[in-house]
Image (cartoon, rainbow, N blue to C red):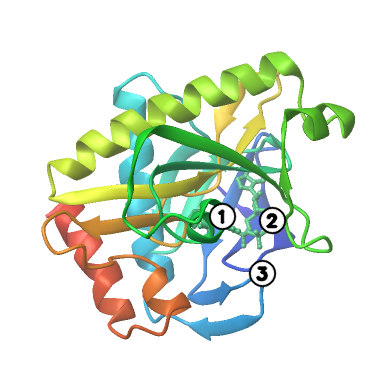
Amino acid sequence: MVKGNMLYEGKAKIVYETDNPDELLVYFKDDATAGNGAKKGIIDGKGVINNKISAYFFKQLKARGIKSHFVDTIGPREMVVKRLDMIKLEIIVRNVVAGSLVKRLGLPEATPLTSPIIEYDYKSDELGDPMLNRWHIMALKLATIDEMNQIEHLSLSINAVLRELLKAKNVDLIDFKLEFGRDKDGTILLADEISPDNCRFWDADTHEKLDKDRFRQDLGGVEEAYQEMLNRLTL
Ligand code: ADP
Ligand code: TMP
């Protein structure tokens, strides 16, 4: 595998072309942002940990029949993935009230939801990632109804798998963000990453936050929380 031209530098990762037109190389950075880029910082070692945790989840999902863009881990911060035509949506799945849902629903943090909630945000830095519903998604032609049905079904299946895996590590999955794309045959695949950057993980007993909220809310112990999640999942 030969690393080619840089295709895109995002807030947390850099994407490169490779000598295989169907594959990309993703480089995980230590850069951290919050509030749509308003707060910026570095979380030492985050890229290495997120690369490992994402690979772990993608492999576990594959073993349970859920396909993703993951091909291989080829370096401490480098993952080879299938090149996808990305759907410009963030799919947020929630099991417990936290973050922006506290304000939107007026419910206290940590209120359990009787069934999961799925939300869609438009991936647009210019617009500040506004929340969309299916009507907006159809009007903007971001995805078809059939694709949205597949995405919802996959998202709920992924939620069930991740909750079960995490429960065994004494971690509650509060909420998380997913991204999907189409491969060259038009098949919808899970993409991007699954890591403490885009999930809320709480210790099941103490409710200690083991994710990026420690950075967002200046709670301290940020690096330690990322390391703790890696240890619980892989040691
Ligand atoms: P952001 O764009 O939000 O700043 P990142 O820094 O994580 O995010 O950049 C990674 C970019 O790569 C994102 O825009 C994401 O949508 C995109 N991406 C993730 N997986 C794939 C894939 N398999 N094919 C093409 N693009 C991808
Ligand atoms: P929120 O409560 O801020 O809306 O976030 C819900 C979940 O989605 C949380 O686990 C963080 C994740 N998320 C991202 O990964 N990227 C984003 O841009 C947003 C808004 C949320």
The three-letter amino acid code for the residue at tag 3 is: Asn
**Crowd around label 1: few <14 · some 14–19 · many ≥20 (10 Å):** many
Q: Which residue is mark 3?
A: 36
- Camera-side mark, 2 or 3: 3
Q: Relative to 18, does residue 49 appear above or below in the rendering?
A: below
The three-letter amino acid code for the residue at tag 1 is: Val
Residue at image coords 42%, 52%:
74
Is ligand 2 within 8 Å of the beta carbon of the residue shown at mark 3? yes
- Camera-side mark, 3 or 1: 3
Is ligand 1 within 8 Å of the beta carbon of the residue shown at mark 1? yes
Query: In the rendered image, is residue 185 in sight?
Result: no
Q: Tell me the SS state at disc 3.
A: loop
**Crowd around label 2: few <14 · some 14–19 · many ≥20 (10 Å):** some
Labelled disc at residue 121: none
Q: Tell me the SS state at disc 2.
A: strand
Q: Relative to 96, does residue 36 appear above or below in the rendering?
A: below
Residue at image coords 22%, 34%:
164
Residue at image coords 31%, 78%:
223
Q: Which residue is mark 2?
A: 4
Q: Quadrant of the C terminus?
A: bottom left
Q: Is residue 49 left or right of residue 233?
A: right
Q: Which residue is mark 1?
A: 26
Q: Position of residue 115 (x, y in %)?
A: 38, 30
Q: Position of residue 123 (x, y in %)?
A: 72, 51
